């Protein structure tokens, strides 16, 4: 019995030794605190709406290994009503790539936000605060489509010279310089050339060109040049060209201009062939007189060349220093020409034209781009499947008909087509078909023109154009291949 | 004076304005142009820097674009490139078909892992490939299988899983893989397939990676193999440099770099295999690569003696050498190419006396070789051929060597001996059962060469075949894996097609 206390003391001592010794024994093998990622991490934070503020009260916060989501069960936590969350996990249980672990928030209607987690916390454990500001998914979606081309400051250095250039051409090259040659008496190369070239100095959309077409038509223009003018006008103007090249791509933009020119010549020739020449009630001279006199264009050409140079420089990727070095002398040259060669009235006209052009385009284009971006996110891929993965006649014919019937105000067909290409993944053939028919044709325009020229001529005009756009679309789609936005591969 | 000046001017024009032919300097000054799919941007930019640093004075130009477009740029637009990188075989095969790339020049440097992925919120509630048939999954975006390797492998995997026909109607094909990816990121599609590493890891800046999640790894044995390839263009004017870059990429340094950039770099092992074992080794390779996706086996077949010569005399350096017996392996050990303890036995052949079917009446057993009617016996040289060595040993053990040796003519290879027997131009020879004497009963029935007598193992000590990892191998660990693989029962069964039996 006397040994009992000793035994009890021994037992107690042994028990204490075990209690103390186990961590010690463990320590001889591997110290848990020394092994990175084995200590618990607690992440807390707030989830708010970006820009407008306010709490995001629904959704989950998730810790994951990007690219290795399938390799472990993700650690998640619901966002509380007050927009707060708390997430506990042991990093070591989530794989070896501790430095790659991230925490992100997934909430319906908002863009997923993902942040990396501080390495120190992941290695040594502890508590960290990670707050999130979530952007609305719709806005993010619009930016996703157009931030690389339309909704970026980079477009200003391209489009601003384009507006000045377009305005300069319009201000200094009189409309009648082209339009006077549209008469039936003019030689065909001249009249058709004028019809196509007049697009450079004239209207911007299919509706704006209609009144001008009607005045030319009533003024006694030949039927071929008149219809060539009606189609080419909206697609060939300077601002529209530059915009298409900038937004969709240089190659597609150039293809479009060449195709429109060729198509307008063909449609003009077909109309002239089928319906004969409309005899002018006025003589060509009278028409020319009615249009006014020539004005000198020398300074305008120099100005246009300089503005074109600024535009080209603006569209080339380069450092800001080099850009300034090239652009500033060009701007100085433009200013010098305006100061020394142009009189005050001409400058005023030019600047007014520029302002008018900007005011006509921007208030429509920007909301339209936003609306297109918004709608593009909502429309399911199945809606445009018929235009995807095919450059066949059906897809291109349907696309050219769609472009012909829809009304696109001021250059919006470019943004529309871009959204179709980038978001809906349609093929380049149907995209080109839309780009070809959309500017020159629209249902409202057809109604107005039809009243004046008759249903037979209108139907012929539309059918020929839709067929031509289909053929050009098929050819373009099969030779160009697929479309990738610059921002997606460079 | 005017005429003189005019004459000088004309002379200058004639000398200076002629068509310039590219000289040696032009070629040397042209940078090594590598067309790289944009999904491989980060690893190849790093490889470019490392290669330039390791080779001072060289200039590497990386051209990035979609893989499809790169191929079109070369094929249709005639653009110049020295090397092209392909994210699978579909793209580079187009260049092979147009004879712009030689099939033999294509090298594999990585093996991709196909994964199923979905939008982050997973609205289709997809967990596995089988869930793609769920009604919640309305659109599955897949890169066009005829144009893209990733699409082709996806189709293979879905076909193998029996899902292709079921989901075909809701499949949206895209011309470029990145478009399929973007459809998922924008929640336009409920699922898609991509390589885990390219572009998901190697070009994250191009992707809204936060918007997708990987759901499942597609089993390796259901597609491909999805090898990332690099190949020199036949029109390359920098071929030497191009080959150097490829070698760098396949070297340990190159692979370590690729691995550091999340490319599942591939250990490419060169295996020297005697051509008699060709058939089963293709099957062995298939099985091995399926189970070891990080290793690829480049099988080089030749005569046993030629393989030995290539290593000992020509300085060729495979990772693993397979012999048909002791002699070939010993030669490598003696030459210091293989460590003495490196050769591992992986099978034994049976040695047989063989004769033309018309001579079976004369040659009925080994002892018959001493008959005066038997005038000609063919054998490979015992000093450098295992068959010759084992045959000589057996004849010595049986006490027949002295009588038989005068009748023996030595030919360099077993194949040569076998051909002569088959043509009936000699009375007898020795060969392994199965290599080349057919051991398959059907083939054996139609063969003109018949085994007369299978020699008892104790007469020649057993024809043991060896697998040896060479000293110079950059990847001894992976090479060792191949050697160990040959001991597996199912692998031995494959090898039994050529008469190889397990080592006792």
Image: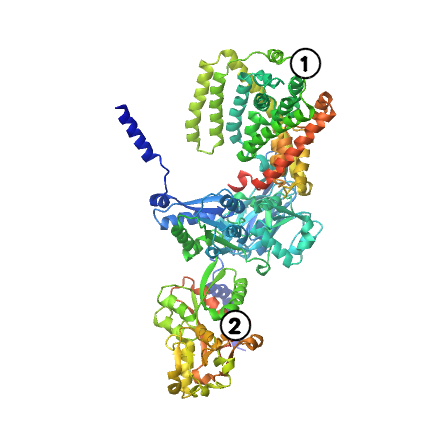
Give the left or right position of residue A306, taking residue A403 as reference: left
Q: Position of residue A327 (x, y in %)?
A: 44, 26
Is B198 on the left-hand or right-hand side of A448?
A: left
Whole-percent x, y for residue B449 in the image:
51, 78
Quarter holding residue A397: top right
Say which residue label 2 marks: B495
Q: Nearer the viewer, mark 1 or mark 2?
A: 1
Residue B452 vertical position relative to residue B172 in the rendered view, above or below: below
Relative to B387, residue A453 above or below: above
Of all chains, the one bearing label 2 is: B
Mark 2: give few (<14), some (14-19) or many (20+) Cα within 10 Å: many
The answer to whether residue A124 is seen in the rendering is no
Mark 1 lies on a secondary structure that is: loop
Task: Name the subunit of mark 1.
Answer: A
Left or right: A223, with B111 as reference point: right
Q: Which residue is mark 1?
A: A281
Give the spatial CA distance, label 1 vs label 2.
Answer: 97 Å
State the SS at label 2: helix
Residue B379 at x, y = what percent?
Answer: 41, 78
- Quarter of the image for residue B309 reads bottom left
Asked if residue A132 is positioned above or below residue A277 in the image, the reply reads: below
User: Which label was assigned to residue A357?
Assistant: none
Tell me if residue B494 can be seen.
yes
């Amino acid at each position: 019995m006397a040994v009992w206390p000793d035994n009890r003391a021994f037992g107690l001592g042994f028990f204490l030794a075990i209690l103390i010794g186990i961590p010690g024994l463990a320590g001889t093998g591997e110290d848990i605190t020394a092994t990175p990622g084995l200590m618990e991490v607690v992440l807390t934070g707030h989830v708010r709406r970006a820009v407008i503020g306010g709490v995001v009260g629904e959704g989950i916060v998730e810790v994951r290994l990007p690219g290795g989501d399938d390799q472990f069960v993700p650690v998640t936590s619901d966002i509380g009503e007050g927009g707060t969350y708390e997430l506990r996990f042991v990093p070591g249980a989530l794989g070896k790539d501790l430095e790659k672990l991230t925490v992100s928030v997934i909430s319906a209607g908002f863009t997923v936000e993902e942040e990396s987690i501080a390495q120190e916390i992941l290695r040594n454990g502890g508590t960290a605060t990670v707050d999130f500001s979530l952007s609305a998914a719709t806005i993010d979606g619009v930016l996703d489509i157009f931030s690389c081309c339309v909704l970026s400051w980079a477009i200003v250095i391209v489009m601003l010279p384009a507006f000045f250039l377009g305005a300069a051409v319009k201000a200094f090259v009189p409309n009648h310089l082209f339009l006077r040659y549209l008469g039936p008496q003019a030689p065909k190369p001249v009249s058709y050339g004028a019809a196509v070239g007049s697009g450079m100095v004239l209207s911007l959309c299919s509706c704006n060109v209609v009144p001008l077409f009607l005045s030319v038509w009533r003024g006694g223009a030949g039927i071929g040049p008149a219809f060539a003018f009606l189609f080419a006008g909206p697609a060939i103007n300077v601002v529209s060209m530059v915009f298409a090249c900038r937004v969709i791509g240089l190659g597609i933009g150039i293809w479009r201009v060449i195709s429109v020119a060729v198509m307008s010549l063909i449609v003009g020739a077909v109309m002239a062939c089928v319906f004969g020449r409309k005899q002018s009630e006025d003589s060509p001279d009278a028409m020319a007189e009615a249009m006014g006199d020539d004005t000198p264009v020398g300074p305008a050409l120099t100005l246009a060349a300089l503005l074109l140079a600024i535009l080209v420089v603006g569209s080339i990727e380069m450092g800001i220093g080099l850009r300034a070095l090239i652009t500033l002398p060009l701007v100085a040259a433009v200013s010098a020409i305006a100061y020394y060669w142009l009189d005050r009235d001409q400058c005023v006209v030019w600047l007014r034209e520029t302002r008018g052009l900007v005011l006509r385009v921007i208030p429509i284009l920007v909301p339209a781009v936003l609306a297109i971006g918004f709608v593009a996110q909502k429309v399911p891929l199945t809606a445009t499947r018929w235009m995807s993965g095919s450059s066949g006649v059906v897809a291109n014919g349907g696309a050219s008909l769609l472009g012909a019937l829809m009304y696109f105000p001021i250059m919006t067909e470019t943004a529309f087509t871009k959204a179709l290409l980038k978001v809906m993944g349609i093929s380049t053939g149907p995209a080109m078909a839309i780009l070809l028919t959309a500017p020159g044709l629209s249902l409202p325009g057809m109604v107005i023109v039809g009243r004046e020229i008759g249903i037979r001529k209108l139907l012929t005009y539309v059918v020929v154009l839709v067929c031509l756009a289909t053929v050009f679309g098929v050819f373009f789609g099969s030779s160009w291949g697929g479309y990738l936005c610059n921002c997606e591969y460079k | 004076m005017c005429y003189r000046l005019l004459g000088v001017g004309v002379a200058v024009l004639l000398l200076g304005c002629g068509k310039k032919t590219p000289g040696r300097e032009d070629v040397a000054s042209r940078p090594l142009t590598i067309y790289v799919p944009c999904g491989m941007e980060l690893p190849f930019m790093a490889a470019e820097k490392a290669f330039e640093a390791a080779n001072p004075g060289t200039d590497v130009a990386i051209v990035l674009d979609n893989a499809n477009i790169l191929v079109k740029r070369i094929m249709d637009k005639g653009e110049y490139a020295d090397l092209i990188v392909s994210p699978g075989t579909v793209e580079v095969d187009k260049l092979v078909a147009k004879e712009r790339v030689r099939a033999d020049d294509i090298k594999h440097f990585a093996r991709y892992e196909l994964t199923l992925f979905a939008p982050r919120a997973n609205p289709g509630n997809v967990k596995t490939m089988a869930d793609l048939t769920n009604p919640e999954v309305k659109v599955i975006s897949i890169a066009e299988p005829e144009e893209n390797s990733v699409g082709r492998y996806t189709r293979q995997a879905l076909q193998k899983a029996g899902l292709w026909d079921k989901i075909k109607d809701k499949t949206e094909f895209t011309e470029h893989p990145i478009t399929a990816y973007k459809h998922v990121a924008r929640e336009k599609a409920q699922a898609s397939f991509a390589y885990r590493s390219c572009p998901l890891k190697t070009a994250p800046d191009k992707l809204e990676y936060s918007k997708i999640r990987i759901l499942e790894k597609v089993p390796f044995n259901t597609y491909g193999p999805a090898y990332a390839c690099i190949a020199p263009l036949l029109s390359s004017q920098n071929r030497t440099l191009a080959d150097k870059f490829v070698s760098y990429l396949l070297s340990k340094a190159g692979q370590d770099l690729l691995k550091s950039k999340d490319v599942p770099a591939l250990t490419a092992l060169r295996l020297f295999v005697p051509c008699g074992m060709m058939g089963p080794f293709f099957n062995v390779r298939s099985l091995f690569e399926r189970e070891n996706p990080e290793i690829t086996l480049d099988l080089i077949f030749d005569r046993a003696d030629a393989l030995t010569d290539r290593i000992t005399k020509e300085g060729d350096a495979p990772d693993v050498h397979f012999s048909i017996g002791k002699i070939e392996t010993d030669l490598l050990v003696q030459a210091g190419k293989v460590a003495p303890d490196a050769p591992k036995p992986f099978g034994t052949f049976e040695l047989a006396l063989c004769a033309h079917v018309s001579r079976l009446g004369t040659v009925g057993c080994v002892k018959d070789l001493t008959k005066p009617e038997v005038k000609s016996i063919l054998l490979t040289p015992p000093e450098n051929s295992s068959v010759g060595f084992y045959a000589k040993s057996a004849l010595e053990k049986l006490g027949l060597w002295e009588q038989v040796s005068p009748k023996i003519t030595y030919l360099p290879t077993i194949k040569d001996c076998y051909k002569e027997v088959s043509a009936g131009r000699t009375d007898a020879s020795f060969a392994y059962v199965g290599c080349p004497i057919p051991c398959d009963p059907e083939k054996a029935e139609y063969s003109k060469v018949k085994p007369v007598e299978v020699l008892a193992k104790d007469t020649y000590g057993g024809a043991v075949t060896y697998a040896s990892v060479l000293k110079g191998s950059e990847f001894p660990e992976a090479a060792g894996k191949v050697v160990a693989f040959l001991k597996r029962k199912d692998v031995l069964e494959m090898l039994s097609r050529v008469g190889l039996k397990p080592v006792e």
